Amino acid sequence: MNIIEVKNLVKRFDDIVAVDDISFAVEKGKIFAFLGPNGAGKTTTIKMFTTLLQPTSGKISINGFDPSTQSDSVRQSLGIIFQDPSLDDELTAWENLEFHGVLYGVSKKIRRQRIEELLKVVELENRRDHLVKEFSGGMKRRLEIARGLLHHPQIIFLDEPTLGLDPQTRNHLWGYIKDMNQKEDVTVFFSTHYMQEAEKMADQIAIIDHGKIVAQGSAQDLEKQTQTDTLEDAFLQLTGKDIREDSAKAIDRLRTNRRVWRR
């Protein structure tokens, strides 16, 4: 059973095609890695999945719902760990989780029980009453994972969740994610630039480049397809070795140039 289905998805920003007619599916309960160079279309795609952007054309199904017309149902189905920190630094760990649970309409009894459970899972029960601004980067990431799981989502989206973390913290973080995937049957959809993470954790992988899906399969499938020994080598062969510019910067530059020209 597919919990995510994408058919002929397109997203344009003025003259830039950020996502160009992509199609793929993710099975329920799987860990799925969405890889690509900077500006390839990863974050734009995730934003469309999570109701933050409207597609230009094409179809998306998230847990059986269309993000364009059934945004509330989609949001109830998913948890999100953003690329940038999104916690309230002036609240405690407990207060951040409590606020999130209230927003998602989780009843008080279930909310409190769930907060207790998740703080133990991410090893923050002893810091529950500490302000988040006192936390390290790894502690904040762990709290964000707990927050994303509070309302029992069917899918959790992780946009470069371990960016900037040390190897020990990354390893612990993936331990929590894998445990959650197995115990709660949560589908995990993540992007990362750490190829070792994708090779180790993902059941299936899709690689996007210049807005198009260029390869799909397991890490072993992609290595076999490219006749390489590692996922990183396969990735470089499929996408090239040139340094890429972030698509958001390219879009902003295009809009700035247009304003200048119109003057």
Image (tube, grey):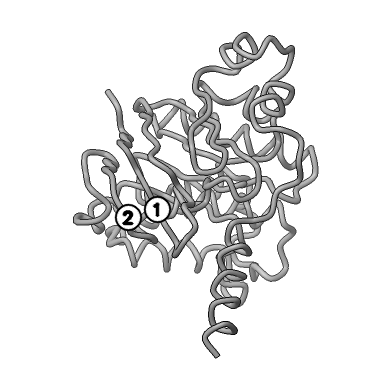
Nearer the observer, 252 or 26: 252
* In this picture, residue 165 sits left or right of residue 82: right
User: Left of 61 or right of it: where is 257?
Assistant: right
Q: Which mark is residue 228?
A: none
The C terminus is located in which quarter?
A: bottom right
The image quadrant of residue 255 is: bottom right
Q: Residue at x 50, y 43 (%)?
A: 211
* Foreground pick, 121 / 19: 19
Upstream in the sequence, badge 1 or badge 2? 1
The reply to whether dot 1 and dot 2 touch (C-beta < 8 Å) is yes
Q: How many marks?
A: 2
Left-right relation of 62 to 259 = left
Q: Is residue 153 above or below residue 56?
A: above
Q: Quadrant of residue 7?
A: top left
- Secondary-structure class at tag 1: strand
Name the kind of residue labelled 1 in the image: Lys
Q: Which residue is mark 2?
A: 56
Which residue, given by chain and number where applicable, does mark 1 sit on? 11
Q: Give the crowd class for mark 2: few <14, some 14-19, many >=20 residues within 10 Å.
A: some
What kind of residue is marked 2? Thr
User: Is 20 or 29 nearer to us in this picture?
Assistant: 20
Q: Quadrant of the N terminus?
A: top left
Residue in view at x 37 percent, y 47 percent = 10
Residue 228 picture location, percent across and down: 72, 13
Element type where label 2 sits in the image: loop
Pinpoint residue 142: horizontal percent, then vertical percent: 61, 49
Q: Residue at x 76, y 46 (%)?
A: 243
Give the camera-side residue of 41 and 94. Answer: 41
Distance (Cα) linking label 1 and label 2: 5 Å
Residue 80 in the image: state x and y as whole percent: 46, 52
Dot 1, how many residues are within 10 Å of its Cα: few (below 14), some (14-19), or many (20+)? many
